[in-house]
Amino acid sequence: MKKITIFLSAIIVLLIVACGATARVVNSFEECVAAGLPVAESHPRKCYTPDGKHFVEALPPDSDDVACTMDAMQCLDGSYVSRISPGCKFAPCPGDDKAQ
């Protein structure tokens, strides 16, 4: 009986050590992806860890990726124009050569 207890204790210790050795600490999006964890194909992409953390992919600044507010400006003729990128200035009114 004593041999079985020692044998089972050794197996439990080995399992605990093996499980602890395979657990990786993830501190960034890149580490999360490298660990093979699930990545949501959103923009920007997000990687999720089993403990509930998530990491967002850092995107380089790009002038084509600017999101302007959805407000509008009323022109003198009663029509409306919206903001355009880059710079998010209002588009020119009909008959006007420069942006407002």
Image (spheres, rainbow, N blue to C red):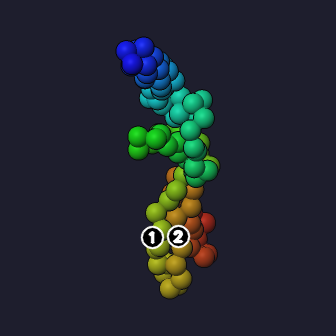
- 82 or 48, which is in the foreground? 48
Residue 17: image quadrant is top left
Q: Residue 38, position in %: x, y? A: 57, 43
Which element is circle 2 on? strand
Is residue 61 among the parts visible in the rendering? no
- Quadrant holding the N terminus: top left
Q: Are marks 2 and 1 in contact (CB under 8 Å)?
A: yes
Amino acid type of the residue that numbered disc 1 sits on in the rendered structure: Asp
Is residue 48 among the parts visible in the rendering? yes
Q: Residue 86, position in %: x, y? A: 57, 52
Q: How many residues crowd around disc 2 within 10 Å: few (fewer than 14), some, or many (20 or more)?
A: some
82 to 75, vertically: above or below: above
Amino acid type of the residue that numbered disc 2 sits on in the rendered structure: Ser
Q: Residue 7 has which mark? A: none
How far apart are labels 2 and 1 at the CA level? 6 Å
The residue drawn where x is 57% and y is 68% is 92
- 7 or 46, which is in the foreground? 7
Q: How many residues crowd around disc 1 within 10 Å: few (fewer than 14), some, or many (20 or more)?
A: few
- 96 or 37, which is in the foreground? 37
Residue placed furthest toward the front = 1
For disc 1, the marked residue is 71
99 to 21, vertically: above or below: below
Which element is circle 1 on? loop
Say whether residue 73 is left or right of residue 37: left
The residue drawn where x is 52% and y is 78% is 80
- Counting the numbered discs, the total is 2
Q: Residue 26, position in %: x, y? A: 46, 29
For disc 2, the marked residue is 82
Residue placed furthest toward the bottom = 78
The residue drawn where x is 54% and y is 73% is 81
- Going from N to C along the chain, the mark reached first, 2 or 1, is 1
The residue drawn where x is 50% and y is 85% is 78
